[in-house]
Image: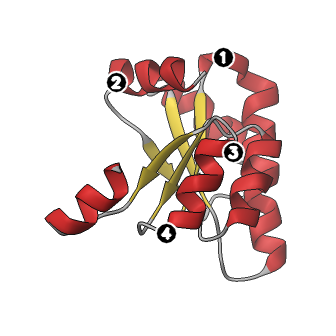
Amino acid sequence: MSQEVLKKINDGKIIAIVRDISSDKIIELVDAMLAGGVSCTEVTFDQSSSEAAQDTLVSIRKICEHFGDRVCVGAGTVMSKEQVRQAAEAGAKYIISPNTDPEVIAETKKLGLVSIPGAMTPTETAYAYS
């Protein structure tokens, strides 16, 4: 599955980052993005509260249910193994994290998802790649 996801990301060229959009408005937003040719969407985890984080998961689930394979959805600002598992259960196909946390990367790979960790320096980039 991860090769299919990478192909969708590479073919689409753009991952739209969705932040601070509530789950009650997510379908309308993603529908507009899809109409404009953007088929990869990252829903960013809102770390401000457990309720906000849960709304992130609701948004991911709604996108998956409504659009199916037409939209390749991932979770962003993933900070823990638990968030990786929750995002996977909601239907996320890839995990974008702001750092090179080995536990987040390992859990993502274990679940068969694509891991896109953040890296700034050449050392971090090499570490994330390995």
Q: In the rendered structure, are the residues bearing label 2 and label 3 in contact, judged by CB atoms less than 8 Å apart?
A: no
The structure residue drawn at horizontal position 42% and vertical position 69%, both measured from the top left corner, is 99
Work out whether residue 101 can be spotted: yes
> Residue 10, labelled with which disc?
2
Q: In the rendered structure, are the residues bearing label 2 and label 4 in contact, judged by CB atoms less than 8 Å apart?
A: no
The picture places residue 74, in percent across and down from the top left corner, at 59, 43
The picture places residue 11, in percent across and down from the top left corner, at 35, 18
Q: Is residue 106 left or right of residue 98?
A: right
Residue in the foreground of this view, choosing between 66 and 87: 87
Residue in the foreground of this view, choosing between 126 and 5: 126
Q: CA distance from mark 2 to mark 4?
A: 24 Å
Could you say which quadrant of the image residue 90 lies in?
top right
Give the amino acid type for the residue marked by disc 1 in the picture.
Asp
Which residue in the structure is indicated by mark 4?
101
Q: Earlier in the sequence, mark 3 or mark 1?
A: 3
Give the amino acid type for the residue marked by disc 2 in the picture.
Asn
Q: Earlier in the sequence, mark 2 or mark 1?
A: 2
Location of the N terminus (image quadrant): top right
Q: CA distance from mark 3 to mark 4?
A: 28 Å
> Which one is in front in this view, the residue at disc 3 or the one at disc 4?
4
> Residue 69, labelled with which disc?
1
The local crowd at label 3, few if under 14, some if 14 to 19, many if 20 or more residues have their Cα within 10 Å, is some
